Image (cartoon, grey):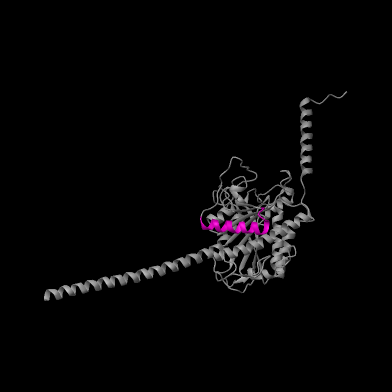
Amino acid sequence: MAASPPVPSLLLTLALALTVAAAAKISALRTPISRDIYHSSDSLLREIKALVARHSDKLSMDTITTSNKGYSADLFVVTFNHVKESVDNGSKVHILLSFGQHGRELITSEVALRLLYILTEKRKIAGVDFSSFERVLENLVIKVVPMENWNGRKRVEEGELCDRRNGRGVDLNRNWSVDWGKKEKDYDPYEENPGIAPFSEPEAQIMRELSRSFKPHIWVNVHSGMEALFMPYDHKNTTPNGASAHLMRSVLENLNHRHFQDSCLVGSGGGSVGYLAHGTTTDYMYDIAKVPMPFTFEIYGDEKASTDDCFKMFNPVDKTTFDRVINKWCMAFLILFEEGLRNLRDAQIVSRGTLDNWVPIGGDVVERNVARKTARERKLEGLDLGMQELRTYFRLFMLSTFLLMFMFCTRISKNRNRDSDEQSA
């Protein structure tokens, strides 16, 4: 009769079996990538390259490669310039859009691809015709980074569905210099590894140089996990002060009202999302790069999904929802372009150029000089009228003073002459 195995061996075997079962259960609960809906990173890049080749009059594409301590990264930057031969005399608005900074957020890169199609091949969204939008596009130069975290995206496609980091485990949205390295009580080293120093990662280095050379007026970092329209700050529970903050909030609130029926969360990332984030791109764009309108858009989130089911949490898993999200947010970007252009020119951050009127999305012809004067313009007009009135009163005062002085001097002169005559007599 065979001897019974020792108790420790039985416990070890049982623990191993339970671990395997638990792992299998977790794996079964995780939704795989919907490969019939989503492009792979390689196929998405091929499609963008083909689109650029078909529309070389409006699109160009640059591949930028940087290495640091044995780690290399490629960044693909697509530039849309509606009229390439035109000279940018300062009237064009520069817009920089980054998608896919976190590898697990596949839906963001799909929005980038569809947006490029809309800008070039005029695909309709929900039956809306964008032919009238040409006048706006003529005044924009747009740079699109469709997949900032190429290496991290590869890790997700290989099965690491919850990974948001780059190819060597750094969160690119914690690798920027504003308040870099600070850790909150709930800091997760797996999720939020900021790297060994600010801009230690090639991807962040490339994006920083791109912001320096392009000098965007509008920056949008596109993420998923919820639906929100964020402005700075991420690292503290407040928004900036002054005219710039008012300008950003005005654009976001108008976008939220026009397109989302006031359903999106609007405010600072640090004050709205429930946690503070240090070393983020958007805070750098505002504090250091001095971008007038830096934003973070969160475009989708499944609140009912398990925290282990990352693909479902951050990405639509069915075609109907997929199309709805893409159409909704492509439309949001077009309205952002419209609102941004108008507000930047109203604030005289860029010159007005030749855009006197246009047909806004879903609206009638707008006469810029009459029918759509902003509150700021009306206020300035009121100030101008007030100054004119003050100048008029000042002139009247000076004239009255001069006449009184003249009469007073004349009176004194007559009195002196009279006194002189009386003394002579």
| Residue 208 seen | no
Question: Which residue does the image show at 57% across and 66% down from the upper left?
Answer: 373
Which SS type dominates the magenta stretch? helix
Q: Position of residue 357 (x, y in %)?
A: 61, 71
Magenta stretch: includes residue 293: no
Q: In this image, 231 relative to 129: left or right?
A: left
- Chain part drawn in magenta: 242-263
Q: Position of residue 189 (x, y in %)?
A: 63, 43
Residue closest to the eye, 278 or 259: 259
Quarter occupied by residue 355: bottom right
Pinpoint residue 88: horizontal percent, then vertical percent.
Answer: 57, 71
Please state, as top left, top right, bottom left or bottom right, where the C terminus lies in the image.
Answer: bottom left
Q: Residue at x 76, y 41 (%)?
A: 26
Estimate the x, y position of residue 163 in percent, counting from the top left: 69, 48
Residue 46 visible somewhere in the drawing: yes
422 relative to 266 in the view: left or right: left
Q: Identify which residue is drawn at 35% across, 71% down.
A: 399
Does the stretch in magenta take in 258? yes
- Foreground: 67 or 243? 243
Image label count? 0
The answer to which quarter of the image holds residue 257 is bottom right
Depth order, front residue of 222/374: 374
Residue at 69% in and 56% down: 108
Q: Quadrant of the N terminus?
A: top right
Q: Nearer the viewer, residue 306 or 304?
A: 304
